[in-house]
Image (tube, rainbow, N blue to C red):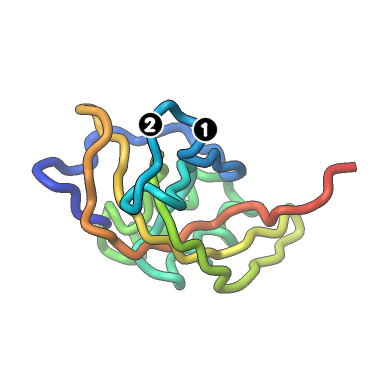
Amino acid sequence: MIALRHFTIASIVALSIAGAASAQDTAAPQNDETAGIKIGRGVVCDTEAQARRFAALYAESGADAALKRVNSEAADQTACAMMVIAFRNTEHISEVSTARDALEIVKVTVVAAVTQQGWQLIDNATQYAAVKPAGIAI
């Protein structure tokens, strides 16, 4: 799991796979360091394979069971976690289609995360997320 400066992840946030709001929507001024930063909630994993595995298991058993299984298989209880993160540089990696849903696997650069102590800075950690693809709502 991503390393936080001075703190570890102590709280897990409720899953909300879809959606991200631009940091530009907040009152904070934009500068070179904050330009392009987005805020999102959902599952982030250390590797693409873990994110793909989570997506496949999520369709079968739901988020909690999928997280437990992926972390057990990785022998790392923090390989994947539900988090609120600040990130940039989203890159499409692949899609996972299941009978229940289609999820996109994206690579993100995480710059901060919410912990029990509030927002904590992270040194540009690469993580992988399973998100619902952007589309047209009918």
Q: Give coordinates of residue 65: x percent, y percent.
A: 48, 47
The residue wearing badge 2 is 28
In the shown orientation, is residue 19 left or right of residue 121? right
Residue 97 shows in the view: yes
Q: Quadrant of the N terminus?
A: bottom left
Query: Please, what is the three-letter code of the amino acid marked with disc 1?
Result: Asp
Whether residue 64 is visible, yes or no, is no
Q: Is residue 93 above or below residue 116?
A: below
The residue positioned 47% from the left and 46% from the top of the image is 38
Relative placement, left or right, of 131 versus 53 is right
Residue lying at 34% horizontally and 65% vertically, measured from the top left: 126
Say if 109 sits above or below 29 in the image.
below
- Of 119 and 103, nearer the camera is 119
Q: Amino acid at mark 2?
A: Ala
Q: Which is more toward the observer, 70 or 24? A: 24
- The residue at the far right in this view is 138
Helix, strand or loop under label 1 = helix
Q: x, y (%) of residue 16? A: 55, 38
Under circle 2, the secondary element is loop
From the viewer's perspective, tell me whether residue 121 is left or right of residue 54.
Answer: left
Would you call the spot at circle 2 few (<14 residues within 10 Å), some (14-19), or many (20 or more)?
Answer: few
The residue located at (58%, 49%) in the rendering is 61
Question: Which of the labelled discs sits on residue 25, or is there none?
Answer: 1
Say which of 22 and 64 sits in front: 22
Q: Residue at x 55, y 73 (%)?
A: 93
Give the left or right position of residue 18, taking residue 138 as reference. left
Furthest toward the left, the residue is 6
